Amino acid sequence: MTFVLAVDDDPAILRTLSINLRARGYDVETAGDGRSALQIVDERMPDVVILDLGLPDLDGVAVLKRLRAYTKVPVVVLSARHESDDKVEALDEGADDYVTKPFDMEELLARVRAAIRRSGGDGAPLVVESGDVRLDVTERKATRAGENVRLTPTEWHIVEVLARREGRLVRQGELLHEVWGPAYDRETNYLRVYLAQIRRKLERDPSKPSMFITDPGIGYRLVV
Amino acid sequence: MTFVLAVDDDPAILRTLSINLRARGYDVETAGDGRSALQIVDERMPDVVILDLGLPDLDGVAVLKRLRAYTKVPVVVLSARHESDDKVEALDEGADDYVTKPFDMEELLARVRAAIRRSGGDGAPLVVESGDVRLDVTERKATRAGENVRLTPTEWHIVEVLARREGRLVRQGELLHEVWGPAYDRETNYLRVYLAQIRRKLERDPSKPSMFITDPGIGYRLVV
DNA sequence: GCGGACCTTGACGGGATCTTGACGCCCGGT
DNA sequence: ACCGGGCGTCAAGATCCCGTCAAGGTCCGC
């Protein structure tokens, strides 16, 4: 279910958006101010955000900035006609598209669809190579000396997190949160088990890892 | 993916068009008035436009004129029976074909296909061959060892999505969104059922698929 | 309104995958 | 030398996911 977050201070608009989006089969949540919007994003990353620029607490642009600090979720901005400065600023800050109020619902829906399509499309394909090992993360294809190697979903998930920060340290807690969810903090044995499996499949000498390096007491890193 | 823009002021007709076109594997966007139609064309040139002549804001002919000012995108015009003047005028303005309301869906689809074909299509026709199996996606023709094989619309839709990304991974969610709509995310049993049917019809040994490969927990891919 | 093709939905067995606990090793601190 | 924390390894049981089948249900043409 595609999950849409709509943010506006006008309950009537939220209602209209909600009804129309739900009628098209989207899962919708609404927020009346920036604070709760950020909270919702935090606990359940939407597939797209519809963001009004005029909010009671935080400025819409401020919300966008905060979002962009840690996610690339597509954002379609709503702006009243006279707020053209804000609009430009919002696009600069990484909004994906904008619609001016009063807006035509069909147009908004079209732009939402377009935003989802673009984001679901090709993010930069993520490929890591080291020695005779090749990891195509977006395609979920791993080869070693030309041979296909099968990784399980969880193994891929871990590899993906490490690959996205290739060379940099990823703390144990971050890995656990990312792969198993925020409730997991101390189950470092999961990491031990899976890193061992990954190494067994990919490392030349699994007992002397050259790609998947342990930083004892801190975390792991993927070096090429 | 061939991209169709449907323009009509009647939401019911848009819905019907949308459903039928999507079911045939087209990517569809809709517009309820001339202004948003032009906007969509502006941001993402369609491969064909279905244009109703009776629109709330701009006249359909006016829309067509504006389109023709900068593009040769094929346009199939919809016209109510009594608007014969408009129809003639539309053809003069460069419409490629017309269909009178109430229209037969199959006829409209045929004319849409014809318009796309005349315009040179959206690129090379999509054909996949593997072993003794041949899949002509654009023509909706499947053969196996020379024998015709019948695929249902939904089966074709799935095959098309996989064929357009031949060799690459298509995630379960993408397939579900593409074929069944954004509300479907967890109905992976649909995929299981249909992939089984497709394999039964096309694979040499359906229990050991060589074309329609499962990536457990992630998605499917079509390899040749 | 009848029949057939197609789609939806639930159930189930088997196999892959995940979870969990136990154990031994290395290493730094005492 | 002893001890404890952190790590790698292993294996067994639980769980999840896939392929398969079959029973309705819906839609469309005759």
Image (cartoon, coloured by chain):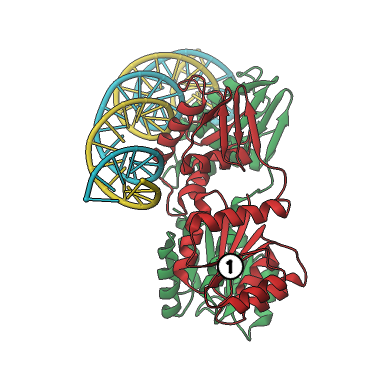
Chain colours: A green, B red, C cyan, D yellow
- Identify the residue under disc 1: A76
Instruction: Where is residue A102? Give x, y as percent.
Output: 54, 82
Identity, as a three-letter code, of the amino acid under mark 1: Val
Q: Return the residue found at the far right.
A: B70
Q: Is residue B216 left or right of residue B69?
A: left
In depth, the one of A200 and A121 nearer the eye is: A121
Instruction: Where is residue B153? Give x, y as percent.
Output: 48, 43
Q: Is residue A86 left or right of residue A188?
A: right
What is the secondary structure assignment of the residue under circle 1? strand
Mark 1: give few (<14), some (14-19) or many (20+) Cα within 10 Å: many
Q: Return the residue found at the far bottom.
A: A82
In depth, the one of B220 and A55 nearer the eye is: B220
Q: Residue at x 49, y 57 (%)?
A: B105
Instruction: Where is residue A212? Give x, y as percent.
Output: 63, 29
Instruction: Where is residue B86? Give x, y as percent.
Output: 62, 77
Q: Is residue B90 left or right of residue B183?
A: right
Q: Is residue D21 left or right of residue A98?
A: left
In depth, the one of A63 and B209 nearer the eye is: B209
